[in-house]
Image (spheres, rainbow, N blue to C red):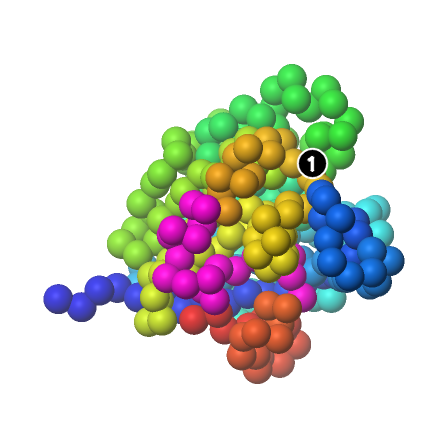
Amino acid sequence: MNQVCYQVLAVKYATVDRARGSNFLHPAPGDPEAPMALDFFVWLIQGPGGAVLVDTGFSSASALARGRRYLVSPLESLRRLGHAPEGIHDVVLTHLHYDHAGNIGEFPAATVWVQDREVRYATGDCMCDPKQNHFFSTDDVGVLIKRLYQGNVRLVDGFHLLRDGIELHRVGGHTDGLQVVRVRTAHGWVVLASDAAHYYENLTLQNPFPAIFSLEDMLTGYAHIRELADGEDLIVPGHDPAVCARFKSADAPGVHAWHIA
Protein backbone atom coordinates (compact mmCIF):
# COMPACT_ATOMS: atom_id res chain seq x y z
CA MET A 1 0.00 0.00 0.00
CA ASN A 2 1.41 3.37 -1.03
CA GLN A 3 1.80 5.93 1.73
CA VAL A 4 0.44 9.44 1.28
CA CYS A 5 3.22 11.96 0.66
CA TYR A 6 3.14 15.75 0.46
CA GLN A 7 5.17 18.57 -1.04
CA VAL A 8 6.34 21.41 1.19
CA LEU A 9 7.19 24.99 0.25
CA ALA A 10 8.92 27.58 2.43
CA VAL A 11 7.53 31.00 1.48
CA LYS A 12 9.58 34.01 2.57
CA TYR A 13 7.70 37.27 3.05
CA ALA A 14 9.93 39.60 5.12
CA THR A 15 13.40 40.06 6.61
CA VAL A 16 15.27 42.15 9.17
CA ASP A 17 18.98 42.82 9.71
CA ARG A 18 20.50 41.69 13.00
CA ALA A 19 23.94 41.28 14.53
CA ARG A 20 25.11 37.68 14.90
CA GLY A 21 25.53 37.93 18.66
CA SER A 22 21.86 38.82 19.14
CA ASN A 23 20.74 35.45 17.75
CA PHE A 24 22.26 33.25 20.48
CA LEU A 25 21.64 32.94 24.20
CA HIS A 26 25.34 32.22 24.87
CA PRO A 27 28.45 33.52 23.06
CA ALA A 28 28.83 31.72 19.73
CA PRO A 29 31.81 31.28 17.39
CA GLY A 30 32.42 34.19 15.05
CA ASP A 31 32.21 37.97 15.26
CA PRO A 32 29.17 38.92 17.38
CA GLU A 33 28.84 42.16 15.37
CA ALA A 34 28.77 40.38 12.00
CA PRO A 35 25.48 40.68 10.08
CA MET A 36 23.12 37.71 10.44
CA ALA A 37 19.70 38.46 8.98
CA LEU A 38 16.49 36.98 10.33
CA ASP A 39 14.03 35.95 7.61
CA PHE A 40 10.29 35.41 8.01
CA PHE A 41 8.48 32.45 6.43
CA VAL A 42 5.18 30.68 6.17
CA TRP A 43 5.05 27.07 4.95
CA LEU A 44 2.66 25.55 2.42
CA ILE A 45 1.91 21.83 2.44
CA GLN A 46 0.40 20.53 -0.80
CA GLY A 47 -1.11 17.11 -1.41
CA PRO A 48 -4.21 14.97 -0.92
CA GLY A 49 -7.00 16.64 1.01
CA GLY A 50 -6.11 20.18 -0.05
CA ALA A 51 -3.43 22.63 0.96
CA VAL A 52 -2.43 23.15 4.59
CA LEU A 53 -0.87 26.48 5.57
CA VAL A 54 1.55 26.51 8.47
CA ASP A 55 1.54 30.00 10.04
CA THR A 56 0.09 33.13 8.50
CA GLY A 57 2.83 35.77 8.81
CA PHE A 58 2.17 39.42 9.53
CA SER A 59 0.73 42.38 7.64
CA SER A 60 2.47 45.34 6.01
CA ALA A 61 1.20 47.50 8.89
CA SER A 62 2.93 45.22 11.41
CA ALA A 63 6.09 45.30 9.31
CA LEU A 64 6.10 49.09 9.42
CA ALA A 65 5.37 49.21 13.16
CA ARG A 66 8.16 46.74 13.99
CA GLY A 67 10.78 47.84 11.47
CA ARG A 68 10.75 44.74 9.28
CA ARG A 69 11.39 44.83 5.53
CA TYR A 70 8.30 43.47 3.81
CA LEU A 71 8.87 41.63 0.55
CA VAL A 72 5.56 40.14 -0.62
CA SER A 73 2.46 39.63 1.49
CA PRO A 74 1.98 35.94 2.40
CA LEU A 75 -1.57 36.30 1.09
CA GLU A 76 -0.37 37.50 -2.30
CA SER A 77 2.32 34.81 -2.44
CA LEU A 78 -0.31 32.15 -1.84
CA ARG A 79 -2.47 33.53 -4.63
CA ARG A 80 0.48 33.52 -7.03
CA LEU A 81 1.15 29.90 -6.07
CA GLY A 82 -2.45 29.01 -6.97
CA HIS A 83 -3.98 28.96 -3.49
CA ALA A 84 -6.45 31.72 -2.72
CA PRO A 85 -6.56 32.33 1.05
CA GLU A 86 -10.33 31.96 0.91
CA GLY A 87 -9.91 28.41 -0.36
CA ILE A 88 -7.56 27.12 2.33
CA HIS A 89 -9.37 24.90 4.83
CA ASP A 90 -6.64 24.07 7.35
CA VAL A 91 -4.28 26.56 8.99
CA VAL A 92 -1.77 25.42 11.62
CA LEU A 93 -0.38 28.07 13.96
CA THR A 94 2.91 26.92 15.43
CA HIS A 95 2.54 29.63 18.08
CA LEU A 96 0.88 33.00 18.53
CA HIS A 97 3.75 35.47 18.15
CA TYR A 98 2.92 38.36 15.83
CA ASP A 99 5.08 37.04 12.97
CA HIS A 100 3.37 33.64 12.91
CA ALA A 101 -0.27 34.42 13.70
CA GLY A 102 -1.12 37.63 11.86
CA ASN A 103 -3.55 37.77 8.91
CA ILE A 104 -5.65 35.02 10.49
CA GLY A 105 -8.88 36.82 9.62
CA GLU A 106 -7.97 36.49 5.92
CA PHE A 107 -8.69 32.74 5.95
CA PRO A 108 -12.45 32.64 6.53
CA ALA A 109 -12.96 29.03 5.44
CA ALA A 110 -10.11 27.61 7.50
CA THR A 111 -10.12 25.54 10.63
CA VAL A 112 -7.27 26.87 12.79
CA TRP A 113 -5.15 24.35 14.69
CA VAL A 114 -3.24 25.64 17.73
CA GLN A 115 -2.07 24.15 21.01
CA ASP A 116 -4.41 24.68 23.96
CA ARG A 117 -1.37 25.58 26.10
CA GLU A 118 -0.43 28.31 23.64
CA VAL A 119 -3.84 29.98 23.91
CA ARG A 120 -3.68 29.75 27.71
CA TYR A 121 -0.17 31.21 27.66
CA ALA A 122 -1.10 34.08 25.34
CA THR A 123 -4.13 35.03 27.45
CA GLY A 124 -2.77 34.26 30.93
CA ASP A 125 -0.75 36.02 33.60
CA CYS A 126 2.51 35.63 31.64
CA MET A 127 1.22 38.44 29.45
CA CYS A 128 1.62 40.84 32.39
CA ASP A 129 5.35 40.64 31.64
CA PRO A 130 6.39 43.10 28.89
CA LYS A 131 9.39 40.91 28.01
CA GLN A 132 6.95 38.18 26.98
CA ASN A 133 3.95 40.11 25.68
CA HIS A 134 6.16 42.19 23.37
CA PHE A 135 6.13 39.34 20.84
CA PHE A 136 2.34 39.17 20.63
CA SER A 137 -0.21 41.37 18.88
CA THR A 138 -3.40 41.87 20.88
CA ASP A 139 -5.26 42.36 17.60
CA ASP A 140 -4.14 38.94 16.34
CA VAL A 141 -4.95 37.20 19.61
CA GLY A 142 -8.34 38.94 19.63
CA VAL A 143 -9.16 37.63 16.14
CA LEU A 144 -8.20 34.12 17.23
CA ILE A 145 -10.46 34.31 20.28
CA LYS A 146 -13.36 35.52 18.13
CA ARG A 147 -12.81 32.58 15.81
CA LEU A 148 -12.67 30.26 18.80
CA TYR A 149 -16.12 31.49 19.83
CA GLN A 150 -17.33 31.00 16.26
CA GLY A 151 -16.29 27.35 16.43
CA ASN A 152 -13.51 27.18 13.82
CA VAL A 153 -10.49 26.89 16.12
CA ARG A 154 -9.36 23.45 17.27
CA LEU A 155 -7.26 23.25 20.43
CA VAL A 156 -4.57 20.57 20.34
CA ASP A 157 -3.30 18.77 23.44
CA GLY A 158 0.29 17.73 22.76
CA PHE A 159 0.09 15.43 19.73
CA HIS A 160 -2.49 15.52 16.96
CA LEU A 161 -2.73 13.62 13.68
CA LEU A 162 -4.08 16.28 11.33
CA ARG A 163 -4.31 13.78 8.49
CA ASP A 164 -2.33 10.76 7.35
CA GLY A 165 1.22 12.07 6.93
CA ILE A 166 0.78 15.40 8.74
CA GLU A 167 1.37 15.47 12.49
CA LEU A 168 1.40 18.22 15.12
CA HIS A 169 3.74 17.90 18.12
CA ARG A 170 4.02 20.31 21.03
CA VAL A 171 7.63 21.05 22.00
CA GLY A 172 7.30 24.33 23.92
CA GLY A 173 10.46 26.23 24.83
CA HIS A 174 10.22 29.41 22.79
CA THR A 175 6.60 29.73 23.95
CA ASP A 176 4.69 27.42 26.26
CA GLY A 177 2.59 25.90 23.49
CA LEU A 178 4.88 26.02 20.48
CA GLN A 179 4.22 23.09 18.14
CA VAL A 180 6.17 21.71 15.21
CA VAL A 181 4.70 20.08 12.12
CA ARG A 182 5.92 16.70 10.87
CA VAL A 183 5.20 15.99 7.21
CA ARG A 184 5.74 12.80 5.24
CA THR A 185 7.34 13.59 1.87
CA ALA A 186 8.89 11.56 -0.93
CA HIS A 187 12.27 12.30 0.70
CA GLY A 188 11.20 11.20 4.19
CA TRP A 189 9.73 12.88 7.25
CA VAL A 190 10.27 16.64 7.24
CA VAL A 191 9.96 18.68 10.44
CA LEU A 192 8.86 22.29 10.10
CA ALA A 193 10.51 23.37 13.32
CA SER A 194 9.33 26.98 13.29
CA ASP A 195 10.82 28.70 16.34
CA ALA A 196 11.84 25.49 18.05
CA ALA A 197 15.04 26.40 16.16
CA HIS A 198 15.31 29.86 14.65
CA TYR A 199 18.57 29.01 12.85
CA TYR A 200 20.39 25.81 11.94
CA GLU A 201 23.20 26.93 14.24
CA ASN A 202 20.87 27.21 17.24
CA LEU A 203 20.28 23.49 16.79
CA THR A 204 23.81 22.35 15.94
CA LEU A 205 25.44 24.42 18.69
CA GLN A 206 22.67 23.68 21.22
CA ASN A 207 22.64 27.44 21.74
CA PRO A 208 19.10 28.83 21.57
CA PHE A 209 17.80 32.07 20.18
CA PRO A 210 17.39 34.30 23.28
CA ALA A 211 13.59 34.56 23.31
CA ILE A 212 12.67 31.72 25.62
CA PHE A 213 9.77 30.77 27.86
CA SER A 214 11.38 27.53 29.11
CA LEU A 215 15.06 26.77 28.49
CA GLU A 216 14.53 23.16 29.60
CA ASP A 217 11.75 22.64 27.05
CA MET A 218 13.80 24.37 24.38
CA LEU A 219 16.75 22.01 24.82
CA THR A 220 14.50 18.95 25.11
CA GLY A 221 12.80 20.15 21.94
CA TYR A 222 16.07 19.97 20.01
CA ALA A 223 16.28 16.25 20.74
CA HIS A 224 12.61 15.77 19.95
CA ILE A 225 12.71 17.36 16.50
CA ARG A 226 15.80 15.32 15.65
CA GLU A 227 13.87 12.17 16.53
CA LEU A 228 10.91 13.23 14.40
CA ALA A 229 12.88 14.06 11.23
CA ASP A 230 14.47 11.57 8.86
CA GLY A 231 17.80 13.37 9.09
CA GLU A 232 18.90 16.86 10.08
CA ASP A 233 18.77 17.96 6.46
CA LEU A 234 14.98 17.57 6.72
CA ILE A 235 14.63 19.89 9.74
CA VAL A 236 13.51 23.35 8.61
CA PRO A 237 14.29 26.19 11.05
CA GLY A 238 11.93 29.10 11.44
CA HIS A 239 14.01 32.11 10.40
CA ASP A 240 17.27 31.06 8.77
CA PRO A 241 18.21 32.69 5.42
CA ALA A 242 20.19 29.50 4.75
CA VAL A 243 16.88 27.82 3.89
CA CYS A 244 16.95 29.89 0.68
CA ALA A 245 20.37 28.49 -0.21
CA ARG A 246 19.89 24.87 0.82
CA PHE A 247 16.71 24.19 -1.10
CA LYS A 248 15.62 24.59 -4.72
CA SER A 249 13.74 27.73 -5.71
CA ALA A 250 10.09 27.23 -6.60
CA ASP A 251 10.72 29.54 -9.57
CA ALA A 252 7.31 31.20 -9.27
CA PRO A 253 7.04 34.77 -10.58
CA GLY A 254 6.73 37.37 -7.84
CA VAL A 255 7.14 34.79 -5.04
CA HIS A 256 10.07 34.01 -2.74
CA ALA A 257 9.54 30.28 -2.25
CA TRP A 258 11.68 27.15 -1.98
CA HIS A 259 10.86 23.45 -2.35
CA ILE A 260 11.68 21.71 0.93
CA ALA A 261 10.69 18.28 -0.36
Q: Which residues are magenta?
A: 223-241
Quick check: is 235 in the magenta stretch? Answer: yes
Residue 84 position in % (x across, y down): 52, 63
Residue 9 position in % (x across, y down): 50, 67
Residue 187 position in % (x across, y down): 36, 71
Considering every residue shown, the one lying at the far top of the view is 125
What residue is rendered at 75% in x and 48% in y?
27
Q: Which residue is mark 1?
A: 136
As drawn, 86 above or below 223: below
What residue is rendered at 65% in x and 17% in y?
125
Q: Amino acid at mark 1?
A: Phe
Looking at the image, residue 89 sits to the left or right of residue 249; the answer is left
Considering every residue shown, the one lying at the far right of the view is 33
Which quadrant of the structure image shows residue 35? bottom right
Q: Secondary structure at mark 1?
A: loop
Quick check: is 33 in the magenta stretch? Answer: no
Residue 86 position in % (x across, y down): 50, 55
- Few, some or many C-alpha atoms within 10 Å of disc 1 (few <14, some 14-19, many ≥20)? some
In this view, the residue in front, 63 or 197, is 197
Looking at the image, residue 138 sits to the left or right of residue 172; the answer is right
As drawn, 87 above or below 218: below
What residue is rendered at 62% in x and 31% in y?
213
In this view, the residue in front, 41 or 71, is 41
